[in-house]
Image: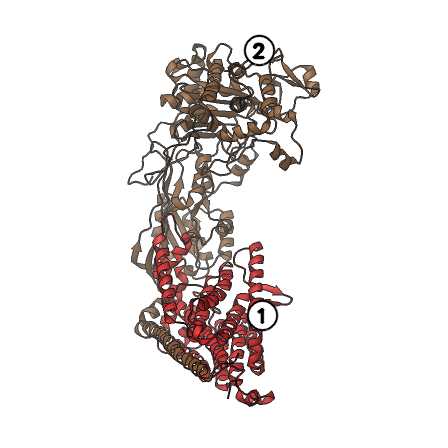
Chain colours: A red, B brown
Amino acid sequence: MSYLDYKVAQVPTGLRKVFFINWPLVLLITAVCCIGFLMLYSVAGGQIETWAQPQMYRFAVGMVIMLGLAFVPMWFWRGISVSAYVVCFLLLVAVDLFGAIGMGAQRWIDIGPIRVQPSELMKISQVLLLAAYYDWLDLKKVSRPLWVLIPVVLILAPTALVLMQPDLGTSIMLITGGGIVMFAAGVSLWYFAVVIGAGVGMVYAVMQSRGTDWQLLKEYQFRRIDTFLDPTADPLGAGYNIIQSQIALGSGGWSGRGFMQGTQSRLNFLPEKHTDFIFTVLSEEFGFIGAFSLLTLYMLIVGFCLYSALSNRDRFASLITIGISGTFFLYFAINMATVMGLLPAKGSPLPLVSYGGTSLMILMLGFGLVQSAHVHRPR
Amino acid sequence: MKKSQRDIVDSNRGITRRGLLLAGIQIGTVTTLALKMRSMQLDHADEYRMLADGNSIKIRLLPPSRGLILDRTGLIVAGNEQNYRVTLTREEAGGDVEPVLQRLAQLIPISDARMSELRDEFSKRSAITPIVLADRLSWEQFSTIAVNAPSLPGVTPESALSRAYPRAGDLAHVMGYVGPVSDYDLSRIEDPDPVLRLPDFQLGKIGVEGRLEEVLRGKAGARRVEVNSTGREMRQLSRQEGEQGATVQLTVDAQLQNYCAQRLGEESAAAVVMDCHTGELVAICSSPSFDPNKFVRGISTKDYRGLMDHDHRPLADKTVQGVYPPGSTFKLVTLLAGLEAGVINSGSRFFCPGYTELGGRRFHCWSRGGHGSVDAVKSLEESCDVYYYELAQRVGIDRIAIMARKLGIGVKHDLPMSAVSEGIAPDRAWKQARYDQAWQIGDSLNASIGQGYVLASPLQLAVMTARVASGRAIEPQLIRSIDGVRKLPEDFPPLDISEASLKVARAGMDAVMNSARGTARKARIEREEWRMVGKTGTSQVRNITAAERARGVISNDQLPWERRDHALFVCYAPYEAPRYAVSVVVEHGGGGSTVAAPIARDILLFALNGGLPPLDAVPSNQRAAMEERHNAMQLYTPEAPRPGRSRA
């Protein structure tokens, strides 16, 4: 059901909307963030100023943004979906252009005093546009090749730009995030089977190409894959982080070494312990109980979103909620899998917990949309 | 757009179904994560706890031994030798290194300066980085420390391999040297090998050592050791040997190279010997040289200053890096350009009155009296400048430049050496781009005799000669094989120059050496089967002022060294079936025929003979001088160790 079809009069208005906000979700998000503050306090060696405090300020701002967005009517988001996508796309182009002048991977762009990472914004605006697209599209056409091709192009165009930065991790997130919306919108499973099949084939081809004339990756990239497959083969090089991370994580045991007692993290065996490897610190200090609890909280957040999506009769709102919760899911699943050595090492933050403003703000923005969808659902 | 009620119901059903499917996938993923957590934190917690506690198991890298570099006959020219040394890790010394340093100073001599240097380093580096306290210790010193190890916490006596160049300076410019890894080195490498961060690990800096670093380095091994709470190693748990770097065989013949170095002597000079068919650089020698072993051990400031301040520039590789006006050797290029363009044929003649007048300016021939009527062969034989002035006006600079590049001048040859020069084969476009000036006809005249803007390296001159000799686009080669796998190209494409033109040039070179009036007749080889042909060159490094000209030509000997002419010579032999092409440049040496030609001849003879030149191959009046030279040389006899099990 589209928002055009339901009676706007039945949607709460003004401050009354406060009562219709998905408060359990707000609570869960706050809980996860609090765990984050605790861990940031711990890795800073008991100092609040280093990381925890700035993160708290950001959380406060994020919370205001999320609740503010919850008041914005759903149809507004639909109205801006195309322009939001175009703006993000142009920002990505701009980043690539500046990146050509600068060195290495350039992901940031300065607009006045604000520093934005367009690839992160793209994750949200892509979901918006795809949701709007599938809301507009006649259901019968969803799986027709031409109508599948359009969203595929919409996903691949920004992905290609991000890949040029180069940022492989975010590109994969963009593809998977977009894929989730397409999946939820009901695109035939055959398409997914073909894409996954092709992906597996390509990985096989890349691995086969090693050492031949048509080698598809640089040698150091292959070495990174080697390290992933067997971190002990290169214990002081690229495998170092993963080995140390696994030692720290495993040594947590059932209940952990206790708050601020993690030795691995304390002795600086771990790199980036306040960002990408913060889950390791949590696991070392609070053990399986701590790690599993965080996982459960995350799953509850995803669960509440999914429930909200499935009980929402507005197709656009449903797809947005699924898309955003899916992106959120990818965030923490990838981070956890990385630090446990299930995925090749690459920098990715643990959502809502890792130190860093951009990822937190983007997530809160996303949850703001989820809230808006929840508040303005047809009744 | 209004949708039917049915559509809406379908749509929601679809979303619900897919939503639940998605939830299923997510739950599956999370279950995997949770299971992995369980496996690590519950099932294997004890193992990880042991690894974490005091980090009692440490992984130590075993530096790989660097690949050998051999000469073409298999002699080691860069090897590895045992180096006994001691390192100290601050963390294992209990945080304070001072008492340990004091105790150590009683066992082995450590200067006060070195001591303060060490203290400085300990304060800067991280506590867990081992720092080398002393290296190149004698066996006695080394064992003394090993015996006293219990009173020296954190001190590790170790024996490591370090680079050694048994041929000292002979191949210094070719091979380059290794040195400690600097921060700058690390910053240049994408994803640096962790072994580079080991204390005192050495990295190829320049030359073959630098350019083939990845090949030579090998792969680090690792050992897992158990250490006690003070950091002392208790036992070794496992050991995985590294892989030695690949053995690189050069095309250079160490004996010939040695002869070249000795023959060039104290001159600031370069000699290149190239195989006319395979392009192999059999010798590539820049003089004076330096001892690369000093760089490996850390050269003293005084020695380094000495090398830097030397006016003969020992550190510069004159063979590939140095560029010189090629002088009359460039006439081969101009002649071939003229013949190929059809502007002249071998019989065309120009009259040489001793000068050419152009736009009110006189361009002199080296022979003031002139050469009279000159044809192509005679123009090379007597090196008549006027012939080329006339030719240059007819053929034009652009076609000369094209021919120069065809013969390898003004082209960057791909060699694994440092700072390989491109030289300059100037043309109109080049001058416009470089100086923003139009090309003048006078520029063409200067260029036609290898003066003016033309610049070539000795390597390029050798390439030119080999190409003229073989008629093929020979590219210089320096690496013969890597780990026994041949790296030389099978064949080279023919040069785009007609055989007829090349024959004229070769006949001219023959006349230079073997005809009665040839400019280099004195330096000829008197054995028919080794008949040598060549071309002299003398290039000015100064402008002769009108005042000087009025006073008469000043002989070179009266000028200060740095203003004297460069002496050049290119040659190949045997005439009928070329084997080696040689180029020699003697900086500020004087005349090409008197200085460079005899050197080139001797080197060529050594190459052809596979040993000292036989005296009867040179004109009889030069034999005594040659014998004297041989006696004065301390030639290298190949009794040096050959590669085998031992790593000498």
Q: Can residue B413 be seen in this view?
A: yes
Q: Is residue A60 visible?
A: no
Q: Are the residues flagged by discs 1 and 2 in contact, CB closer than 8 Å?
A: no
Q: Position of residue A294 (x, y in %)?
A: 42, 78
Say which amino acid is labelled 2: Ser
Specify the quadrant that holds the C terminus of chain B.
top left
Q: Mark 1 points at which residue?
A: A83
Q: Where is residue A34 in the image (x, y as percent from the top left)?
A: 49, 79
Q: Which mark is residue A269?
A: none
Same chain shared by disc 1 and disc 2 = no
Q: Mark 2 points at which residue?
A: B373
Give me the C-alpha separation between circle 1 and circle 2: 84 Å
Q: Position of residue A151 (x, y in %)?
A: 47, 68
Circle 1 chain: A
Q: Is residue A281 left or right of residue B451?
A: left
Circle 2 chain: B
Say which amino acid is labelled 1: Ser
